[in-house]
Amino acid sequence: MRPNKRRVTFFAVCAAICLMLTAACGRSGGDASSDKPLIGVSIRFIAGNSWLSTLAKGAETTAKAEGYRVEMADAQGDASTQIQQMKTFINKGAKAIIIEPVGDRNVAAGIEAAKKAGIPVVVVNDRVTPELAKEVACNVYDNGYETARQVGARAAAAAAEKFGKSEPIKLYIQALFPQELVTEQREEGFMKGWDEYFAENPGYETERVPNNYGEALPDKTLDAMRNVVSANPDINVIFNQTDVVMGSITEALRAADLMTSDGQSDVIIAGFDGGMDVVKAMATDKGTPVVASGLNQPAKQSGYAVQEAIAAIKQKPTGECEGSPATRVLPPQIVTPDNASEFVDDKLEFAGSL
């Protein structure tokens, strides 16, 4: 009986090993995506922000088309979390890392870790300091300053026509983040266009309402706007730095009886990001208070970032990312009621995001 038992045990072990090998082979063949090279992507925050979620989807779509897989990480607005995510990508063997950075200088440790590991980093949308920008393979972003300058000039012209010279034009900027490059670029560009218009058309006076910061989040923006319109019920012009929170802007105006239920208002609004709901309103509603929105095309930006990451992996430059720091910049473009119908597309959340 003992020899028979040994034979049974031997064959049972062999059978178990065969089953394990078969299952392992089956998993490898069934999950082909795991064999594709990895690009790690860490975004400042994804939840609650449709622009950044569109940026994330654009990266995934482009990477898949190019034969790469993307692992997406939400840094939840915390720089230390983003640094740790970058280090995790390094440990997982990522071929490149793309970051939408949490702040312009406090992710330096993550960039340095990737550099030591020989892994190229691409920065998209938000900016890092010029010193850090020189340490990465490419910096991909929109020309926020020039785009905002065009928005500012358009808003100034609309304000001059509507309010005249009898009283100061009361201007408020609903900003993103304090002491951040993207926020500053949009404000400086807007004010450049605004001031240029009035330099060419003298006799108007501007009164600035101090900035408030909503961090591109609807709830924080709503709180900021409620405080502003409560203290300044005679506000004339609002530059909202992101269409992501345009609903909060209009909700606050309605609550203060500065906008009717059907969206009519004596307050002029200028936006940024080309939110499709804003674009549609400009295209279809002649009474919309929105006079312009700057385009920055999130899916296109992240698509370009993936292209530059792959170029760095293969060490074959695209020819589009040049200079020192190496940059690839989207050209400035704005949507106004005059051209809004050209940008309406029900498949897109943000105009021009192809």
Image: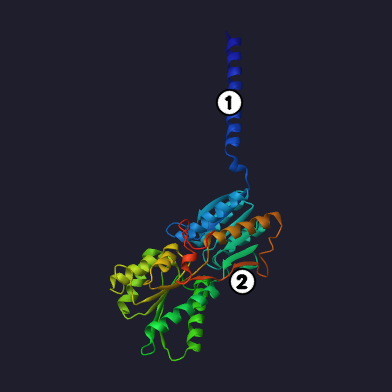
**Quarter occupied by residue 140:** bottom right
Q: Is residue 97 above or below residue 160?
A: above
Asked if residue 66 can be seen in this view, the reply is: yes
Q: Secondary structure at mark 2?
A: helix
Q: Position of residue 142 (x, y in %)?
A: 56, 68
Residue at horizontal 65 percent and vertical 69 percent from the top: 325
**Quarter occupied by residue 159:** bottom left
User: Which label is found at residue 19?
Assistant: 1
Q: Residues within 10 Å of mark 2 (few under 14, many from 20)?
A: few
Image-based side of 236 in relation to 16, left or right: left
Asked if residue 117 can be seen in this view, the reply is: no
Q: Is residue 28 above or below residue 59?
A: above
Q: Secondary structure at mark 1?
A: helix
> Which part of the image, by quadrant, shows the N terminus?
top right
Front-most of 124 and 287? 287
Residue at horizontal 44 percent and vertical 56 percent from the top: 47
Residue at horizontal 58 percent and vertical 28 percent from the top: 20
Residue at horizontal 61 percent and vertical 10 percent from the top: 3
Q: Which residue is mark 2?
A: 130
Image-based side of 62 in relation to 322, left or right: left
As drawn, which residue projects farthest toward the right? 316
The amino acid type of the residue labelled 1 equals Leu
Contact between marks 1 and 2 (CB within 8 A): the answer is no
Front-most of 200 and 65? 200
As drawn, which residue projects farthest toward the bottom? 203
Image-based side of 127 in relation to 247, left or right: right
Q: Position of residue 80 (x, y in %)?
A: 52, 60
Q: Which numbered disc, 1 or 2, marks the residue that appears first in the sequence?
A: 1
Q: CA distance from mark 1 to mark 2?
A: 56 Å
Q: Position of residue 237 (x, y in %)?
A: 39, 78
Q: Position of residue 305 (x, y in %)?
A: 60, 59
